[in-house]
Amino acid sequence: MINIYHDKLTVAMSTEWEVTTMIIIKSAYRTVFAAIMLVVSSGFFMGSVSASTPDNVLVVGQIAEPKSLDPATVTAVNDFRILMNIYDGLVRYKDGALEVEPALAESWDISADGKTYTFKLRSGVKFQDGTNVDADAVKFNFDRMLDDKHPFHNTGPFPLSFFFSAIEKVEAVNSSTVRFTLNAPYAPFLSNLAYPTGLIASPAAIKKYGKDFGRNPVGTGAFKFDTWKSNEAVIVSRNEGHWEGKAGTEAVIFRPITDGNTRVAEMLSGGIDMMVEVPPTSLAKFSGNNFAVAEQAGPHVWFLILNAKEGPFANKLVRQAANYAINKKAIVEDVLEGTAAIAAGPTPPAFAWAYNDALEPYPYDPAKAKALLKEAGVSNAKLTFYVTQGGSGMLDPVAMGTAIQADLSAVGFDVEIKTFEWNAFLGEVNPGLEGKADMAEMAWMTNDPDTLPYLALRTAAWPDKGGFNSGYYSNPKVDELLEAARSSTDQAERARLYKEMQTVVQEDAPWVFVANWKQNAVTSSKVQNFSLQPSFLLLLKDVQKK
């Protein structure tokens, strides 16, 4: 498959980019409107030639072109990293934690039965189009996602509306008070509100742009949308009227650079000020005084989805064999250069209170894998394996896929790899593997121990039912445990249920559990006040460039 982004950006790497910043004075306020014009000059970078980014404008190397900038319609962390700077939610995660604190809502109350949440909104906050942030605006956002009769429900689809499936109704009590009534106690509700799917968009802008809102986003965030030049840049400029004060830079340019080596070259040459998801083999290149490397452990799982509905992996013994066949230690140490740990199950250890530390990862045991395949009556099974060239949390997916192919071949599988660009990959995998593939790479970065298993392991989360269980795994016991855990208001009981779920899932092996990653980023020495978040989101309001 030809990667259009890669082709364009490889050329960009080999040329000198001149970035022109235009600052317009309007109504006595200094605002950046069209912050950038990218001009590609001829000729190749030579040793002493380097690009230069404009002062007070932060240029970020992203891993892919965003799919949309409508927070209700996207699923990729790549897109979320932009959205978190354009929008705010009712609540947000505290700096450096997954604990929730006030944002657009200054306070809230929870009823004794855990089913009613009442939020008091900050006064005087406006969307970037000048319209008011009030209870009706909040209600509009959630009704749009959840009510299929809402006049703007057709601006979807809304793949993560699962996050808010417990909402029975949303009421504007008065202009500054909004009430959510749930159909049952739902422990992850506040955490889900802090996730990008819960960000609040301008109803007026949604009504104006309809299905094109994702290309014309309007929120309340520290930066407001300016320009989206496909496959080249998304540009946002400082929101001078942000309720929490002005951002530290005048503008941010998000450049999609899908190839990790190209991002590294751009970072080394000065073409970008920051890059996320540095290839592990390239980290040592940034050890000098001109760069700073940031690392942050978080709730990440890299795994292989196995097609449990049809083909060889419909047999649990074959799924277990795949887990024994793959040398995850070699992947973590050799391919990922020690930037991850071997995964033991579907819940990452970052959720310490819910993590089952009694589980041991499947050991590398090719002989055991061969014995299980013999017991299952499977030999020379042909597998179609979907691999992505890069994407949110995907680490080094091509190299990892190649290593996995070799390990599976060594125990008797015949593995064919099919490689896709990230958004095309999601378009193939999210609708389900039935009739297409036997296995696919995947990575999730989540906000609560409920999120990943509820959206990707329940029977009711099969793709034809609106979920992300692309391998069609089904176990009634897992369904029961997950439903009970999300409705319990007792964290100790939730922990017990999640730990039991992990034991059942590890035994069933609907996935090959590969790695838990420590995210990383590199910034130039000009960038100050930047830190990575355990949520894997990118918060740039307080970042300065000097």
Image (cartoon, rainbow, N blue to C red):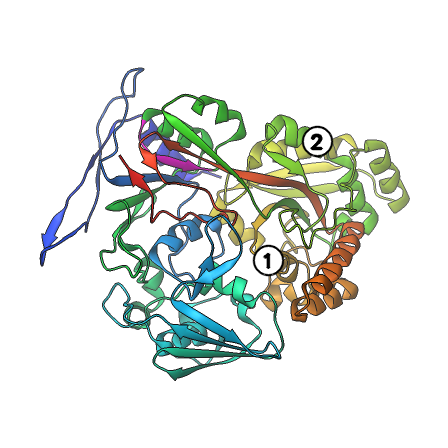
Indicate whether residue 392 is drawn in magenta.
no
Q: Quadrant of residue 298?
A: top right
Q: Is residue 177 above or below residue 362?
A: below
Residue 35 x %, y %: 21, 45
Residue 99 x %, y %: 53, 57
Q: Secondary structure at mark 2?
A: helix
Q: Is residue 70 left or right of residue 305?
A: left
State the residue at coordinates (75%, 68%).
Answer: 480
Q: Please identify the residue farthest to the right as the structure is shown.
A: 375
Q: Secondary structure at mark 1?
A: loop
State the residue at coordinates (53%, 70%).
Answer: 164
Earlier residue among tags 2 and 1 = 2
Range shown magenta = 270-276
Q: Is residue 159 visible?
A: no
Which numbered marker is on residue 360? none
Distance between mark 2 and mark 1 Cα atoms: 27 Å
Q: Is residue 143 left or right of residue 472?
A: left
Identify the residue position indicated by label 2 in the image. Answer: 329
State the residue at coordinates (44%, 34%).
Answer: 259
Neighbor class of circle 2 (other Cα within 10 Å; few <14, some 14-19, many 20+) is: some
Indicate whether residue 271 is drawn in magenta.
yes
Q: Is residue 364 left or right of residue 203?
A: right
Q: Please identify the residue farthest to the top as the structure is shown.
A: 47
State the residue at coordinates (28%, 21%).
Answer: 44
Residue 84 x %, y %: 40, 54
Task: Tell me the mark number nearer the camera, choosing from 2 and 1.
Answer: 1
Identify the residue position indicated by label 1 in the image. Answer: 448
Nearest the camera: 433 or 9?
9
Q: Is residue 492 visible?
A: yes
Residue type marked 1: Asp
